[in-house]
Image (tube, rainbow, N blue to C red):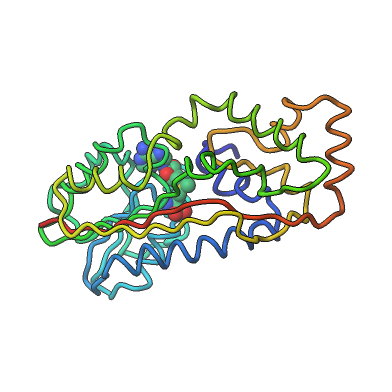
């Protein structure tokens, strides 16, 4: 069965269908989920709207924390992912499902929810300020917004290496792949690169939110999980809108260069360092 690009990425291309890469991603995601839900100040009877719910990482995490009268509204542009959440919910009457985009939550009434949560969704939007206005509209007075977004431009500005791998005989090839990827995907990745944590603050304040708090975490060249499954890594795409690393390598390198890269990376544990920044934002609708 073929599913849309968002579902394909979350279900397969994010981890290359590899158990070890899935476990790594899961560790990061668990921290991000706790960060969003911990800042949402959930109460047992809350109505929570999870915008861009994906497979329900945040929405089902919220459901576990609510009482029998609490409710979670799962919302996404992807019908395939809403279907996936419906299957996972298995008839739990506390769950409802509303198709739609963060920038136009027409299916959600004014002042109808207590909490809006969102993780890694705004990054794909080219109308981010409009999304904040929608969150404000659907929240009741006293309602809370809690969201997480990666700040992707940080790694580029810091000159991060592909896979965080540096100091190897194939650094030149990794740099060539990264440059080709940035050039070819520049347009599609523009919404992911064009903002930072200060913009998140500004959009929240401009939309009318009060008590706006932002927690920013930046890491530069921090030791990270090594690259130890080269075959699986090539099946991974860094986001839903771009090719896999394997496809990028095929486009960027000559046959001889690909052989040199494979010869070095295959069957070896290559140390890696992480350079990235993320932001958690929470705010109150007065
Ligand atoms: C990286 S996934 C995050 C999924 C989920 N929030 C999580 O934490 O696992 C991005 C999600 O945003 C959805 N999405 C993309 N653009 C959107 C938009 N403009 N409005 C609402 N959802 C969107 C995708 O369908 C996908 O489910």
Residue 226 coordinates in the image, percent (x, y): 72, 58
Say left or right for 64 vs 110. Answer: right
Ligand 1 falls in quadrant: top left
Classify residue 20 by image quadrant.
bottom right
Q: Residue at x 42, y 61 (%)?
A: 89
Classify residue 285 by image quadrant.
bottom left
Q: Residue at x 31, y 64 (%)?
A: 93
Residue 131 coordinates in the image, percent (x, y): 27, 40
Q: Is residue 140 above or below residue 234?
A: below
Say left or right for 111 vs 4. Answer: left
Q: How many marks?
A: 0
Say left or right for 132 vs 1. Answer: left
Judging depth in this view, the residue of 247 and 51 nearest the camera is 247
Q: Is residue 259 above or below residue 272?
A: above
Q: Is residue 202 visible?
A: yes
Residue 111 coordinates in the image, percent (x, y): 12, 52
Judging depth in this view, the residue of 123 and 197 nearest the camera is 197
Q: Is residue 99 above or below residue 254?
A: below
Classify residue 8 by image quadrant.
top right
Residue 68 coordinates in the image, percent (x, y): 28, 74
Q: Quadrant of the N terminus?
A: top right
Q: Quadrant of the C terminus?
A: bottom left
Say left or right for 270 vs 87. Answer: right
Q: Residue at x 18, y 47 (%)?
A: 205
Q: Residue at x 31, y 46 (%)?
A: 198
Q: Is residue 79 visible?
A: no
Judging depth in this view, the residue of 200 and 135 nearest the camera is 200
């Amino acid at each position: 069965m073929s599913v849309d690009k968002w579902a394909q990425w979350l279900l397969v291309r994010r981890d290359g269908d590899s158990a070890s890469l899935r476990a790594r991603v899961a560790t990061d995601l668990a921290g991000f989920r706790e960060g969003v839900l911990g800042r949402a100040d959930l109460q047992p009877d809350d109505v929570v709207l999870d915008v861009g719910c994906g497979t329900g990482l945040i929405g089902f995490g919220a459901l576990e924390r609510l009482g029998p009268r609490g409710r979670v509204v799962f919302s996404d542009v992807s019908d395939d992912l809403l279907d996936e959440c419906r299957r996972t919910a298995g008839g739990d009457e506390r769950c409802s499902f509303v198709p739609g985009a963060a920038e136009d939550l027409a299916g959600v009434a004014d002042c109808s929810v207590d909490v809006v949560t969102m993780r890694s969704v705004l990054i794909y939007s080219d109308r981010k300020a409009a999304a904040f206005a929608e969150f404000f509209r659907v929240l009741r007075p006293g309602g809370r917004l809690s969201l997480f977004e990666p700040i992707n431009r940080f790694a580029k500005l810091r000159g991060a290496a592909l896979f965080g791998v540096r100091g190897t005989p194939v650094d030149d090839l990794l740099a060539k792949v990264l440059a080709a990827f940035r050039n070819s995907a520049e347009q599609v990745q523009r919404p992911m690169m064009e903002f930072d944590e200060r913009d998140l603050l500004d959009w929240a304040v401009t939309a009318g939110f009060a008590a706006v708090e932002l927690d920013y975490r930046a890491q530069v060249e921090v030791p990270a999980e090594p690259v130890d499954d080269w075959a699986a890594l090539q099946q991974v795409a860094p986001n839903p809108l771009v090719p896999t690393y394997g496809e990028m390598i095929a486009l960027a390198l000559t046959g001889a260069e690909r052989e040199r890269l494979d010869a070095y990376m295959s069957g070896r544990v290559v140390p890696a360092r992480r350079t990235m920044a993320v932001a958690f934002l929470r705010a109150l609708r007065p």
